[in-house]
Amino acid sequence: MSVRDEETPEPGEGTDPEQAQTGAEPGDGAPDQPAEELPDDHPEGEDQPAREPEGATESEVDPESDGTEPDPEDAPEPEPEGEPEPELDSDIDPEPETDPASETELETDPAPGVEPDVAFDEARDPDPDSNPDPEPEPQPASDADVPADEPETIVLPAQPDPIPDETDVTPTKKKRRRGRRAVLIAAGALVLLGGGYVAGAWYLGDRVPGDTTVAGVNISGLPIDEAERVLTEGLAEETTAPVDVSFGQITAEVDPTSAGLALDTTATVDSVTGFTLDPRRVFGHLFGMGEQPPVLDVDDEALTGALSGLAENLDEPPVEGAIDFSDGEPEITEPVDGTGLDVDAAAEVLAEEWLTADGTIELPATVLTPTIDDAVIEDAMTTQVEPMLSGPVTVEVNGETAELSADEVAAAAAMQADGSVLTLVLDGEPLANLITERVPSVGESPQDAQIVLDDGEPTIIPAVTGTGLDPAELADAVASAAVASDAEERTAAVELAQTEPEFSTEDAEALGVTEVIGTYRTPYPSDPVRTENLIAGTAHINGTLLKPDEQFSLLEALRPISTANGYTVSGVVVNGFHSDAIGGGLSQVSTTTFNAAYESGLTDITHQPHSRWFSRYPEGREATVFDPSIDMVFENNTGYGVLIQAYVTDSHVVVTMWGTDVFDVTIDVSGRYNFTQPQTLYNPDPQCHAEPGGQQGFSVTVSRTVTRDGDVVEDDSYSHTYSPWNRVICGEEPTEEPDEDSSED
């Protein structure tokens, strides 16, 4: 029998077929007492006499008797065949079955107004044909014939055997109870299993599941406190050691403490302990959980700040496209994409792989595209440069005209970047001088005051008020005419004006460039080619005037670093190896200038020492330069003007800062520490230079304090590590070949 059959009885369920087919003798139960028929005038709604328990009740409900048909008015109304009375199922005793043969007597409560039934004999004759002939139907007794102390007996007509329906299979009460018992047993088993599961989860919750590791540290089966201790001690070195990261071809280190990275030991242990019904945790106590991720405490702001600072050193900025003019011809600098550190993505990678990474962590990069790209260059050449060089520009002033050739305009021209646009800008001073020479009626242009070096000392050349052309107005007019493609439109009309210089004599005097505030010199080796670069480099920065709060960029002063600008090919250090490049030796100009500014108390904006130490420079206090990525920049913080004087003697490069001495400067350089030994390296580069090596690498720390009238203006320090001078052998590193003569017995 299916479970559905047990739980959902079919129609007719609740009536035992055997009992339904067993007839009762009319006189069974009380042979000496006359039977009493049910009255036909029983009030509707009054409780009927209670039925006897099963086995007796069903056999007494038949509306027909075996031989004598009762008067229709006196007989009870028959129930529909096959449908039990509504109260039948509710009378089934849910207690375990009792053998009907052992039941001798059952009692029921009498209905109101009816005397209790007498007990019926439980004996049944299974064969309806063997029943004796029914006795004549007893006549109803009068109330006077019934003893007052004797209960009334009711005898119902026997029910004929029903015709069995082979298509209707009705489960027996015994089978139904057996199905319910199975369901109860299964439910009980599930309850026991669930209770055991919950109890096990609770009991094992205070220990780490077996075979559990975190970042390689085994904490299997340990109590919570012990697991936290083992995890803290086991990862003590990993949580404080610098993290090796790489970005493109560059490697660096990140201090996890300053970057806001920490291991949350408590949360990590909590993630594998404690009460939970999660089957992964519960069954982990039986089968192990394996390697589990550590829970980290990440300070997002500190991590982002650390990576942003790292990006300043690791980023390779893009090369912006540019157009310069040399001898009347345009020179194009092709734009090149740069590579930048993707700080947000790098923070996610570092936070996720910090304790679990095997080796160096590769940080994600992003492409830095130049603002002035190929399209901007092409547009500027088409719409401005080519028209400017296509022919002369006519200047009309005071009714007279003069021409400026294309080369003369180009000599005063520059393509200035304005966002993502290149714009032609002209220097009006040389153009005004040319027009003044060619048109006699034009007065003198204004002249700014100048501070120049005369006999090695600063001298002021007074400003001149203009009585003729306004250089700015002339420059704008010529620039507009120069880009016109129609020859008739290439005329610039200007008027004479009384103009004042932008930088007056009074302005120059107020700058207070009167005394030396710092100077430095470095010796250079005997190398005529390299010395040419030193001479060209110092000449480009000599006489530079910095007004208050202005910054000085060495690369801007030296550019373009090309043979056309006076530079030659000489030795440089690239990626730790000696090589050759245009401008070799300019790092000495950078180092000398940096130290002069550093000792003057000027603000150090950026500088980068060499990768290995050269004995001609002070330890830690030197600065290399490499176009376009490495620059040396400082700022005039004195409140006065600063004039740079730079030159080359027979043996030294000298840089002197002139201005007003307002600072007291103290510089301290630590002793060497963190020594590293040289190694033997192989360089397959065709331009390789072999090197004997031998000098150790080391670290130093430089500190500087700048005060003004006793107040500290700047107090800073930095450290730098030099690589050793390795032995360099040109060529590929040899591979070890097995000894052909060697053999094994």
Image (spheres, rainbow, N blue to C red):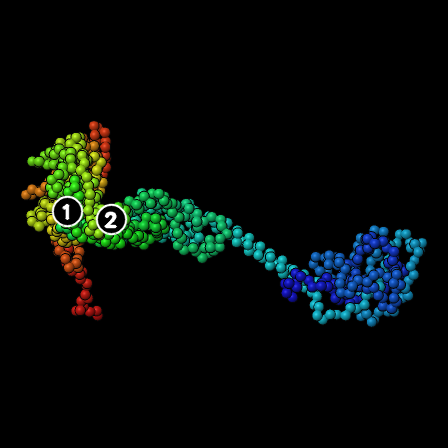
Residue at the location (15% across, 34% down)?
Answer: 465
Exactly how many numbered labels are in the figure? Answer: 2
**Residue 403: numbered disc:** 1
**Residue 422: numbered disc:** 2
Residue at the location (49% across, 50% down)?
Answer: 276
Amino acid type of disc 2?
Leu
Secondary structure beneath label 2: strand
Answer left or right for 351 relative to 407.
right
Q: CA distance from mark 1 to mark 2?
A: 26 Å
Residue 660 occupies quadrant: top left
Return the disc, 1 or 2, that comes first in the chain's sequence: 1
Instruction: Specify few, some or many for label 1: CA neighbours under 10 Å numbering under 14, 14-19, or 20 or more.
Output: some
> In front: 708, or 56?
708
Q: Is residue 742 above or below residue 110?
A: below
Quadrant placement of the N terminus: bottom right
Amino acid type of disc 1?
Glu
Residue at the location (23% across, 54% down)?
Answer: 382
Q: Looking at the picture, how far across and down is residue 736, in whole percent?
A: 19, 63
Residue 549 occupies quadrant: top left
> In front: 343, or 644?
644
Answer left or right for 299 relative to 339.
right
Answer left or right for 610 relative to 143.
left
Q: Looking at the picture, how far across and down is residue 263, in whole percent?
A: 37, 46
Quadrant placement of the C terminus: bottom left
Secondary structure beneath label 1: strand
Residue at the location (40% across, 53% down)?
Answer: 292
Residue 579 occupies quadrant: bottom left
